[in-house]
Image: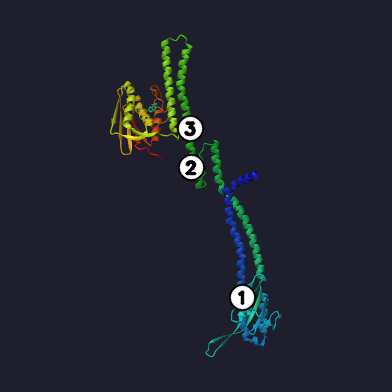
Amino acid sequence: MNRFRELIAYYSKYLRSMKLWLFMGIVIIGVVPCIVLSKILPRTYVKRAIDVRISDVTNQLHIISDHLITVNFLQVSSSEVIDAELAQLSNLYDGRILIIDSGLRIIKDTYSISQNKTIISPEVIRGLRGETISSYNDDDGYIEIVVPIVETLTGADGENIQNIRGVMLTSVATDTISATTERLRDVSDLVTYLAAIFVVVVAYLLCIVLTKPLKILTAAISDVKEGYTSEPVMVRDYLETERISEAFNTVYNRMKLLDDSRQEFVSNVSHELKTPMTSMKVLADSLLVDESTPPELYREFMEDITKEIDRENKIISDLLSLVKMDKTSAELTITQVDINALIELVLKRLRPIARKKDVELEFVSMRAVNASVDEVKISQIVTNLVDNAIKYNREQGWVTVTLDADHQYFTIEVKDSGMGIPEDSIGHIYERFYRVDKSHSREIGGTGLGLAITRSAILMHRGTINVESKPDEGTTFTVRIPIVYIVD
Ligand code: ADP
């Protein structure tokens, strides 16, 4: 039972095949009209042929009925002319003709079977009332026609008086019509079979041709998936396949970019983590090799090793901050924060470093700002920007932090009189591990991660960061953050 279900599940997937639906669609559209036509055509022919036959015979009967009156056949019951006409008619249509007088007596039967007998049938009686009746018996294959024999007299007032003198009752065989219909049916059946075969073959070929671009597209995508080709996928046969190709290429390029940047990140991380390790190893080895190292040199080396450990620590903690912010689930702890107090606190912490470099640190507050933000992250943003402004400043330089706000955003501007950033580097400063001058940044304890962390924290607050810089004149970073945190 389970095996049976598995089989059904396996084959039912083919029911979703576009090829199959296309094939069935074309076959139905092609074959159904053929079948309908092959059924309708013979039927239409039969109906038309019977109508024509009835009309022909009725006309003939009307002519003969006029002649019957002319030769007064109903009285004399014999006339060579009439006999000849009747014989011709019955031969022509393979029919039997009865002439019945108004007393329901058969005065002439071309088969000579019922001569002088009385006939009572509803059709005859209706005929005697002046009706012309025709009916077709499909089962036995004959047409029956009743035509009244009408004598037109002129009355005393000159008006025409119709006098029904009898009826002519005729049955005409329809064998020839049936034979033609049979033939027609055979031919139309044959044509239908041939058309059906033709349609099935054409449908099959069309399906293959029409779905070929999709097959090519699938193959091209599979090739890319397996890494066989770096060529972009492009199947232009249909607008749809072109759009799928374009969409695929966009996704593919984005994935490639992500993969490349991930690889670059990993190699950067390894390199950055290895550098302090190598220094430490060199320092430790040199101490180990020389057993008679004087204590002062020992101490100096140990101080260097401690510096490298601090550096390693900084890189790792910066990396952890970044990774935490990269996670989609990263959450902010939003509280109402006095931004003025927050900046004051950060500057207070950084003032000793600024003093060491003889850099003047100033805070200009345009107004009191209270915002719903993540306090730790905003502190981190301000610290990184001011720390950079001090680090990349000149001796006796200055740093000004300005806080302002409108009804929607608060703005923190960090302006320095430092070395500035070259124009071609400005686009890269937010990249992880990017440093304009690697050795200088290392010397002053930079990891190249500060601005990347800053930018991520700002983006998490749905804010923006801009930089304007002129080499040897200074740099201004402007951060804009919504006062009220925007929830998705
Ligand atoms: P780092 O840890 O090296 O400071 P950041 O990501 O904070 O790394 O900054 C990246 C690079 O941008 C720095 O190495 C430096 O070259 C440049 N930079 C950042 N801030 C300034 C500034 N205020 N003045 C000049 N250059 C700066």
Label 3, label 2: how far apart the Cα atoms are = 20 Å
- Please, what secondary structure does the residue beneath circle 3 have? helix
- Please, what secondary structure does the residue beneath circle 1 have? strand
Q: Residues within 10 Å of mark 2 (few under 14, many from 20)?
A: few
Q: Amino acid at mark 3?
A: Asp
Q: Residues within 10 Å of mark 3 (few under 14, many from 20)?
A: few
Q: Is residue 335 left or right of residue 5?
A: left
Asked where in the image residue 164 lies, by quadrant, the reply is bottom right
Residue with the most extreme top position:
292
Residue with the most extreme bottom position:
156
Residue 47: assigned label: none
Residue 247: assigned label: 2
Q: Amino acid at mark 2?
A: Ala
> Closer to the N terminus: mark 1 or mark 3?
1
Q: Which residue is mark 1?
A: 134
- Please, what secondary structure does the residue beneath circle 2 have? helix
Label 1, label 3: how far apart the Cα atoms are = 92 Å
Q: Amino acid at mark 1?
A: Ser
Q: Residue at x 46, y 17 (%)?
A: 282
| Ligand 1 image-quadrant field | top left
Q: Mark 1, mark 3: which one is toward the viewer?
A: 1
Residue 473, position in %: x, y?
Answer: 31, 28
